[in-house]
Image: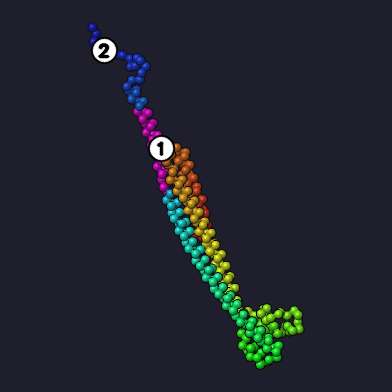
C-alpha cells in the first residue's frame, strides 16, 4: 500500500477557500477604512471653516450691536437737544409777545397824545420808547401815514421793527429742527445696524448646522450659504458710519 497522500482539489465545491475569503475581507475592510478616512477629512475641513466663519460672524454681530447702541444714544442726545431748543424758543416767543403787547400799549398812548395835541405827554412817551420801537416809529412817520394810503398801518409792520427775542426764537426753532433731523438720521443708522445683527445671526445659524448632515452636498451648501451671507453683511457693514 502506497504512503503517498492524495492531493485534493483546493475547492471542489466552488466555494472560496479560507485564504481567498480572508483576502477578500481584508480588501473590503481597506475600502471601508479609506472611505471613512475621506469622510473624516471632509468633516474636519467643514468644521474648521465653519468655526472660522462663526467666529468672524460673532465678532461682527457684537460690533453691529455695539454700534446700534451708540447710535441709539446719539439719537437720544439729539432729541434732548431738540426738546430743549423748542422749550427755549417758546420762552423767547412768549417774551417777545409780552414786549410787543407793552410796546403796542405805549404806542397807542403816544398816538392818542399826538391826536389830542398833548405834545408834552407825547414827548414824554416817545422818550421812553424802546430802541426798536423808536427806530420803527421814525421809519413809519417817514412814510407819511396820514397822507400815504400805501403806508403801513402801524410801526409794528415796518421791517425796522425787530425784537431780539423774536430773532432768538427763530434761531432756536431752526436749531430744534436741525437736532430733530440729526436724531432721525441717528435712529435710521441704529435701525440699520440692528438689521445687520439679524443678518449675522443667519450666518451663525447656517454655519452652525453645516457638518450636521449625512450628506456632503448639504453640509457644503450650508457652509457656502453661511459664507456668502457673511461676506454680504460685511460689505454692507463697512459702508455704515461708526461712532
Q: CA distance from mark 2 to mark 1?
A: 52 Å
Nearest the eye: 18 or 223: 223
Tell me what residue is drawn at x 74 percent, y 84 percent. Answer: 146
Q: Position of residue 160 (x, y in %)?
A: 66, 80
Q: Is residue 199 magenta?
A: no
Residue wearing tag 2: 5
- Residue 140, quarter of the rendered image: bottom right
Tell me what residue is drawn at x 41 percent, y 41 percent. Answer: 43
**If the image is split into quadrants, where does the N terminus sit?**
top left
Q: Earlier in the sequence, mark 2 or mark 1?
A: 2
Coloration mode: rainbow
Nearest the eye: 238 or 17: 238
Neighbour class for label 2 at 10 Å: few (<14), some, many (≥20)?
Answer: few
Residue wearing tag 1: 39
Q: Position of residue 60 (x, y in %)?
A: 45, 54
Q: Which residues are magenta?
A: 26-52
Neighbour class for label 1 at 10 Å: few (<14), some, many (≥20)?
Answer: few
Q: Element at badge 2?
A: loop
Q: Is residue 37 magenta?
A: yes
Mark count: 2
- Left or right of 187? Residue 118 is right
Tell me what residue is drawn at x 32 percent, y 22 percent. Answer: 18
Instruction: Please tell me whether residue 156 is drawn above or below residue 18 in the rendered image.
Output: below
Instruction: Please tell me whether residue 77 is drawn above or below residue 238 in the rendered image.
Output: below
Using the rendered image of the protein, determine whether residue 35 is visible from the camera's viewpoint. yes
Instruction: Please tell me whether residue 205 is drawn above or below residue 190 in the rendered image.
Output: above
Which-is-in-front pick, marks 2 and 1?
1
Nearest the eye: 82 or 147: 147
- Residue 165, quarter of the rendered image: bottom right
Q: Element at badge 1?
A: helix
Q: Position of residue 105 (x, y in %)?
A: 63, 83
Q: Position of residue 44 (x, y in %)?
A: 40, 42
Amino acid at each position: 500500500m502506497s504512503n503517498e497522500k492524495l492531493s485534493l482539489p483546493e475547492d471542489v465545491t466552488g466555494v472560496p477557500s479560507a485564504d481567498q475569503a480572508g483576502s477578500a475581507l481584508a480588501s473590503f475592510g481597506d475600502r471601508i477604512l479609506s472611505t471613512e478616512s475621506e469622510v473624516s477629512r471632509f468633516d474636519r475641513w467643514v468644521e474648521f471653516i465653519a468655526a472660522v466663519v462663526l467666529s468672524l460672524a460673532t465678532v461682527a454681530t457684537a460690533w453691529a450691536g455695539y454700534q446700534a447702541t451708540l447710535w441709539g444714544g446719539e439719537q437720544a442726545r439729539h432729541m434732548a437737544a431738540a426738546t430743549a431748543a423748542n422749550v427755549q424758543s417758546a420762552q423767547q416767543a412768549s417774551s417777545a409777545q409780552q414786549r410787543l403787547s407793552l410796546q403796542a400799549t405805549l404806542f397807542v398812548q403816544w398816538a392818542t397824545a399826538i391826536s389830542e395835541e398833548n405834545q408834552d405827554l407825547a414827548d414824554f412817551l416817545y422818550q421812553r420808547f424802546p430802541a426798536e420801537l423808536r427806530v420803527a416809529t421814525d421809519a413809519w412817520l417817514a412814510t407819511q401815514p396820514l397822507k400815504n394810503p400805501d403806508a403801513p398801518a402801524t410801526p409794528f409792520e415796518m421791517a425796522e421793527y425787530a425784537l431780539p427775542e423774536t430773532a432768538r426764537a427763530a434761531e432756536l426753532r431752526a436749531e430744534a429742527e436741525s437736532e430733530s433731523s440729526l436724531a432721525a438720521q441717528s435712529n435710521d443708522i441704529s435701525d440699520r445696524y440692528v438689521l445687520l445683527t439679524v443678518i449675522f445671526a443667519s450666518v451663525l445659524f447656517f454655519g452652525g448646522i453645516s457638518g450636521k448632515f449625512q450628506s456632503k452636498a448639504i453640509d457644503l451648501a450650508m457652509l457656502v450659504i453661511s459664507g456668502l451671507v457673511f461676506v454680504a453683511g460685511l460689505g454692507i457693514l463697512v459702508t455704515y458710519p461708526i461712532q
